Image: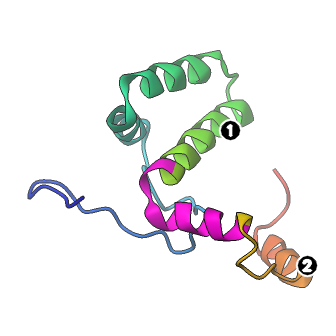
């Protein structure tokens, strides 16, 4: 589906196996607007979960879950990556690569 002239076309994610903080919606207003494209029930459910979450980590998890939902349901490259992984068509990354990545992320929050 192509974007209308007044809409920004969707960008591919840098890595379909990982959603970086700079990818996808960057504000609650943007997140709600994109969830609304999936359906009004998505926005209602998101708002209820966000309202019930305590400040801090719990709210961040609700927001991260909603961003992942958007990626899973709107980005074909993300769906293709998941399907390939489930079908065993992708190579597993070595554990050393995982630890190297985690070391660049700093201490656990």
- How far apart are the alpha carbons under marks 1 and 2? 25 Å
Residue 63 versus residue 22 in the image, above or below: above
Q: Is residue 48 left or right of residue 5?
A: right
Query: What is the secondary structure assignment of the residue under circle 2?
Result: helix
Q: Is residue 29 left or right of residue 72?
A: left
Q: Position of residue 15 (x, y in %)?
A: 57, 73
Q: Is residue 95 left or right of residue 16?
A: right
- Say whether residue 18 is visible: no
Q: Which residue is mark 2?
A: 95
Query: What is the secondary structure assignment of the residue under circle 1?
Result: helix
Q: Which residue is mark 1?
A: 61
Instruction: Say which of 82 and 8 sits in front.
Output: 82
Q: Position of residue 36 (x, y in %)?
A: 35, 32
| Label 1, residues with CA under 10 Å away: few <14, some 14-19, many ≥20 | some
Tag 1 and tag 2, C-beta contact below 8 Å: no
> Which numbered circle lies on residue 88?
none
Instruction: Say which of 97 and 88 sits in front.
Output: 88
């Amino acid at each position: 589906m192509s974007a209308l002239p007044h809409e920004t076309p969707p960008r591919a994610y840098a890595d379909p196996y990982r959603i970086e903080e700079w990818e996808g919606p960057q504000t609650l207003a943007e997140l709600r607007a994109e969830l609304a494209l999936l359906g009004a029930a998505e926005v209602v459910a998101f708002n209820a979960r966000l309202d019930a979450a305590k400040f801090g980590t719990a709210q961040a998890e609700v927001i991260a879950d909603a961003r992942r939902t958007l990626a899973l349901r709107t980005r074909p490259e993300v769906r293709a990556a998941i399907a390939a992984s489930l079908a065993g068509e992708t190579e597993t990354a070595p554990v050393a690569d995982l630890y190297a990545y985690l070391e660049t992320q700093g201490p656990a929050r």
